Image (cartoon, rainbow, N blue to C red):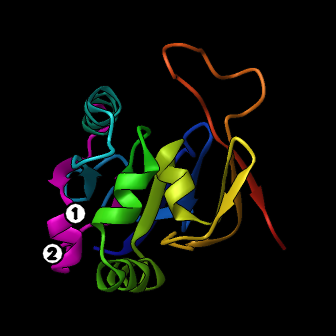
Amino acid sequence: MRKRSVLFPMLILGVLLPAALPVHGDAADVSATTIGIYVDAGAHPSCSSSAGAMFRWMGFTTRGVTAADVNAGAIEGLAAIYFPGGSSPPYIQNITPAGKAGLLAAIEAGMAFIGTCAGAMFAAEVQVWEGRRGTYGQLGAFRGEAVGPAPGVCSRPSGVCATDLRVTA
């Protein structure tokens, strides 16, 4: 069986690194491809469950991932890891520097990173929220800023907001 890649659709207001997931066999047979879904503090439960349902509907296998898993390096075998919307400070605080280094190494070795809203903010080199700029513990998986809330896409008082990604060349 030859190894092929299937392009994965980029999630709105998210980031995907790299842009293809490895797939063995027929392009439609992705069941052996596992996507880790971050389900720990900061991940909004409805974002995690909706993404999990979408990935499974697409034929992928999914596995819940916690900060302890990332910190222990227990993310091997994942073709991609998804960090959902929610709140990025828990991602930044609960994933240790060693966990972030391991996650970056896995991305550099070919694991895709998918992030929406808070997940994309975590992945950015710089986070700007309501005008406050921070580089405190970001993953730094891509050069650029994650800026929020995106103008006109924040519903107060519910707090449902979106992130605008600005990639630096």
Answer whether residue 24 is visible to the viewer in this image. no
Residue drawn at point x = 45 percent, y = 50 percent: 88
Quadrant assignment for the C terminus = bottom right
Which residues make up the magenta segment? Answer: 57-82
Residue drawn at point x = 22 percent, y = 63 percent: 67
Q: Which one is in front, 7 or 128?
A: 128
- Is residue 118 in the magenta section? no
Q: Earlier in the sequence, mark 1 or mark 2?
A: 1
Q: Which residue is mark 2?
A: 74
Left or right of 55, for residue 115: right
Quadrant assignment for the N terminus = bottom left
Left or right of 103, for residue 164: right
Left or right of 57, for residue 82: right
Residue 122 image position (x, y, % from top left) = 50, 59
Q: Verify CB contact (< 8 Å) between mark 1 and mark 2.
A: no
Residue 48 image position (x, y, % from top left) = 29, 36
Taking the view exactly as shown, the residue that stands out farthest to the front is 132
Residue drawn at point x = 25 percent, y = 47 percent: 41
Taking the view exactly as shown, the residue that stands out farthest to the right is 169
Q: Which residue is mark 1?
A: 67
